[in-house]
């Protein structure tokens, strides 16, 4: 039986966060999963080099409180993650987000994930999948996801946060190979299956969550929530129920198919049980679920596609360099131009744009879906 436990805290006050984390570990006994002296990878969500207040990454104060807690268990803590975007270096991203300073000041070592090389495994169907060898250099992993929506997978929680173990340059390529929610969820489940034995705990930052068109262009919503678990799939399933989703996300469906969602018990600190109402999901979500048997025509007529808001675009070209289909070119006015014949609607450009300049446009027929 796995444990999932939740507590509340009003804001990013480091001492209060630390206190709630301590109480949640003691409530569940998950601290027994660690031995003093072990080397633990603390893996936050460092999607992109963005400031903490944008709510795109795990908050640095949350990272700092977690490092301090793990140090009290006598653990050696190293912090690392691979951001999205083909050319973004992990150290640059961790410094920009404030995670580097927060982690070092709290007693952790921050390491660039690029230095660990890559290991490759084969799925049952023979697909080659690459992840960082960092997982062989540590005794265990503490997963530190941020609660956000995601235009491809509906939500990004603990299992999706494991995708940060895929090297940056491969991330975009996998979006090309696995462009639909179902295929991408299959990939996430493959990766999760290979790393789950190493994951000792999940500590979820849901103090300020992101709803709407996440994972980077959504709206911030204060939930004041901290979650912990000894199992990524269990806490993800519990969160989906708490958010009141009509149906499980494609990630949970895939995990259930593989029997990777264990039985679990949910506990609340101080009887603070909370239901979250009206959590906004991505605007493209219904279109994402149009079954492929309806054919290419239906999928062309009923869809969401990216466009550029020229008043916000700075011409930085991050969208073009992260497009797995090479569908973004330079137009004569220096702004990105989409080649919709090549575009696979993965929305990586929307995810990576630092200026929220890529908007999602619906075709006329989407209003009837
Ligand atoms: S749309 Fe966004 S990512 Fe692309 S060039 Fe403009 S600002 Fe940069
Ligand atoms: S243009 Fe955007 S949505 Fe289309 S393939 Fe490229 S990154 Fe994906």
Image (spheres, rainbow, N blue to C red):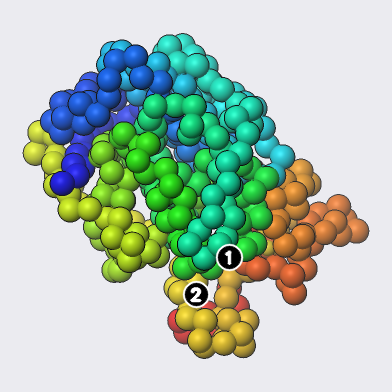
Q: Residue at x 70, y 56 (%)?
A: 323
Residue 168 spot, x, y in % from top left = 63, 42
1 and 2 marks in contact (CB < 8 Å): no
Q: Residue at x 57, y 27 (%)?
A: 94
Give the vertical position of 366 relative to 186 (above or below): below
Residue 271 spot, x, y in % from top left = 9, 39
Q: Quadrant of residue 144?
A: top left
Mark 1 close to ligand 2, CB under 8 Å: yes
- Ligand 2 shows up in the quarter that is bottom right
Disc 2: CA contacts within 10 A as few (<14), some (14-19) or many (>=20): some
Q: 224 and 343: which one is in front?
A: 343
Label 1 vs label 2, nearer the camera: 1
Disc 1: CA contacts within 10 A as few (<14), some (14-19) or many (>=20): some
Q: Quadrant of residue 34?
A: top left
Secondary structure under badge 1?
loop
Give the alpha-carbon distance from disc 1 to disc 2, as whole Å: 14 Å
Question: Which residue corresponds to mark 1?
Answer: 179
Earlier-in-chain disc, 1 versus 2? 1
Secondary structure under badge 2?
helix
Question: Quarter of the image containing the C terminus?
Answer: bottom left
Q: Residue at x 77, y 68 (%)?
A: 339
Left or right, 262 with respect to 316, comes to left
Residue 363 spot, x, y in % from top left = 60, 78
In the rendering, which numbered label is found on residue 106?
A: none
Left or right, 171 with respect to 271, comes to right
Residue 86 spot, x, y in % from top left = 69, 44
Q: Is residue 220 visible?
A: no
Question: Which residue corresponds to mark 2?
Answer: 287
């Amino acid at each position: 039986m796995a444990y999932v436990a939740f507590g509340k805290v009003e804001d990013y006050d480091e001492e209060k966060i630390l206190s709630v984390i301590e109480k949640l570990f003691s409530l569940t006994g998950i601290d027994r999963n660690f031995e003093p002296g072990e080397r633990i990878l603390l893996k936050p969500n460092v999607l992109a080099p963005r400031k903490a207040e944008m709510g795109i990454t795990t908050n640095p104060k949350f990272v700092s409180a977690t490092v301090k807690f793990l140090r009290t268990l006598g653990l050696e803590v190293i912090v690392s993650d691979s951001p999205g975007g083909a050319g973004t270096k992990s150290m640059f991203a961790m410094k920009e987000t404030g995670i580097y300073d927060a982690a070092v000041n709290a007693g952790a070592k921050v390491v660039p994930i690029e230095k660990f090389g890559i290991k490759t495994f084969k799925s049952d169907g023979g697909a080659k999948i690459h992840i960082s060898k960092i997982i062989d250099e540590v005794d265990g992993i503490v997963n530190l996801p941020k609660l956000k929506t995601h235009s491809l997978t509906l939500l990004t929680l603990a299992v999706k946060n494991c995708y940060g173990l895929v090297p940056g340059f491969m991330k975009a390529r996998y979006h090309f190979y696995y462009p639909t929610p179902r295929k991408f969820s299959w990939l996430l489940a493959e990766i999760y299956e290979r790393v789950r034995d190493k994951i000792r705990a999940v500590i979820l930052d849901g103090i300020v969550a992101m709803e709407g068109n996440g994972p980077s262009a959504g709206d911030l919503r204060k939930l004041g929530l901290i979650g912990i678990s000894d199992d990524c799939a269990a806490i993800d399933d519990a969160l989906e129920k708490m958010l009141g989703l009509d149906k499980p996300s494609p990630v949970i469906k895939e995990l259930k198919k593989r029997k990777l969602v264990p039985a679990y018990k949910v506990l609340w600190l101080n009887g603070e049980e909370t239901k979250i109402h009206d959590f906004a999901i991505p605007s493209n979500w219904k279109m994402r679920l149009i079954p492929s048997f309806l054919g290419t025509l239906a999928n062309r007529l009923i869809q969401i596609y990216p466009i550029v808001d020229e008043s916000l675009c700075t011409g930085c070209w991050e969208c073009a360099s992260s497009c797995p289909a090479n569908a973004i070119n330079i137009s004569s006015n220096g702004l990105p131009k989409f080649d919709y014949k090549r575009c696979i609607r993965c929305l990586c450009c929307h995810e990576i744009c630092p200026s929220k300049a890529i908007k999602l446009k619906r075709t006329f027929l989407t209003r009837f879906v």
